[in-house]
Image (cartoon, rainbow, N blue to C red):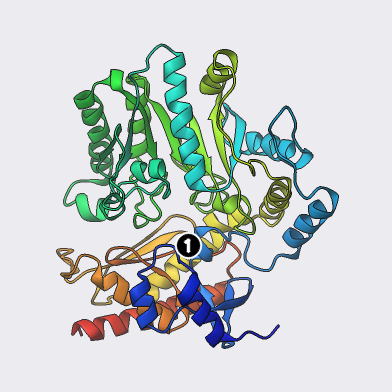
Amino acid sequence: MSVDTAELKRLSGAHHWHPFTDHKELSALGGPRIITHAEGVWLTDSAGVRILDAMAGLWCVNVGYGRRELADAAYGQLTDLSFYHGFFKTTTAPTVQLAARLAELTPPGLSRAFFANSGSEANDTIVRMVRHYWALKGKPGKKIIIGRDHGYHGTTMAAASLNGMPAMHAQGGLPLPDFAHVMAPYPFEGQGEMGAEAFGRLAARTLEEKILQLGPENVAAFIGEPVQGAGGVIIPPDSYWPEVGRICREHDILLIADEVICGFGRLGHWFGCQRYGISPDFMTLAKGITSGYIPLSAVMVGDRVAGTLIEEGGEFYHGFTYSGHPVACAVALANLDIIARDGLVRRAGEEIGPYLRTRLEEVLDGHPIVGEIRSEGMIGAIEIVKDRRTRERFPGNGRVGLMARDHCFHNDLIMRGIRDSLVYAPALTMTEDEADEVAQRARRALDLTARDLGVT
């Protein structure tokens, strides 16, 4: 099908409000790039240019683009039953089958799935469940939910309040009441001369300090991503999560693991909880659950909470028209089959993930503005610094990260700039040749960034 690029750009400028976009800037740049096709890890735009996507869309296309099995699953379900809901004592077969499958895959004790359409909706659901649970337990004062600096949990009013992102809080009078935040376990910025294990425990204990400051009788839950994704791929020391678990248990605080980015193989485990030994009361799932082919999210609810809500809570006045949509659930089931059949979890952790990290280290070895390359499975970050020894940043509060991102885009490579870093999270199906190409294009982008900064 032919595409009139100029007309689409005109229509976009007149009518389409893009997410996370400065529209005045976009207009000055001539409008958006129009993506028309995708296969594997490659995008094609309306000019016929092929683009290497090292971000799997938005951290989500775990099995790669163009998988016919997922299109067939959607088509088959559409022809059998295009839609029915889960209200009024009804459900559909794919919805039930997916709930059971997720209960098998996730850590023990998470036996119930509540479906929504996005990670934001799922985290909003968790906020309601958490507060309803404590009210049923006779502790209605336990309302405060603690997140972390640089944490990202969505963009609805409640989910954005869980975030630790001041730029988002500045729009809309956020955070809402009864949300608090503590430091992130960000070794590159905070560890200094301290050992990794000691720093992990130090970061975790800021949670305990905050709980004691607010009063355990007022704190309902703590939420965290096993690896913080949109906050800059912050990988915690191994000592961090066990200490967080201890703190939550000792102070009777519910633990929420946001697995929207980490889940479904990205860390080389089905879920980040398995990598870090986390035993959560809730898990937030989205993105890789369908590899982004169709919107779907899920809240996995632990038996402790589910038992109380079911036995004592009566009707739960919450849900969405498309909760457990049968087409989305059918696609999710086919997607999980592909991940299992093709061994993508092991591949991310033991093969292509380490290979990509090694190639980046080789190609960027000694680069004057690269301070660190870190990764866990198929997610990683390249820190950009002015001084490699002291880790001093360039002035501009993230300006250099955006410069590097733009140079990636101009070299037909999709990486994301977060503060002064480039982050990546490709499809788990990426080949070694494609990983080599990522490394080479990233090198070119960073060379051009260094040139613009006057660094040789």
Q: Nearer the viewer, residue 265 or 453?
A: 453
Kindly indicate the quadrant of the structure image that contains residue 402: bottom left
Kindly indicate the quadrant of the structure image that contains residue 180: top left
For residue 366, above or below residue 298: below
- Which quadrant would the C terminus be assigned to in this image? bottom left
User: Residue at horizontal 34%, vertical 52%?
Assistant: 234
Does residue 140 show up?
yes
Would you say 240 lies left or right of 409 here? Answer: left
Does residue 364 show up?
no
Residue 377 screen position, x and y as percent: 48, 56
> Element type at marker 1?
loop
Residue 68 screen position, x and y as percent: 75, 65
Residue at the farthest front position: 14
Would you say 440 lies left or right of 103 here? Answer: left
Residue at the farthest right position: 80
Residue 174 screen position, x and y as percent: 29, 44
Q: Nearer the viewer, residue 307 or 385?
A: 307
User: Residue at horizontal 44%, vertical 55%?
Assistant: 376
Would you say 24 lies left or right of 134 here? Answer: left
User: Residue at horizontal 31%, vertical 49%?
Assistant: 172
For residue 125, above or below residue 167: above
Q: Nearer the viewer, residue 292 or 176?
A: 176
- Residue bearing the label numbered 1: 425
User: Residue at horizontal 58%, vertical 68%?
Assistant: 430
For residue 392, above or below residue 376: below
- Which quadrant would the N terminus be assigned to in this image? bottom right
Q: Amino acid at mark 1?
A: Ala
Number of other residues with Cα within 10 Å of mark 1, as a class: few under 14, some 14 to 19, many 20 or more: many
How many marks the image carries: the answer is: 1
Residue 243 screen position, x and y as percent: 33, 32
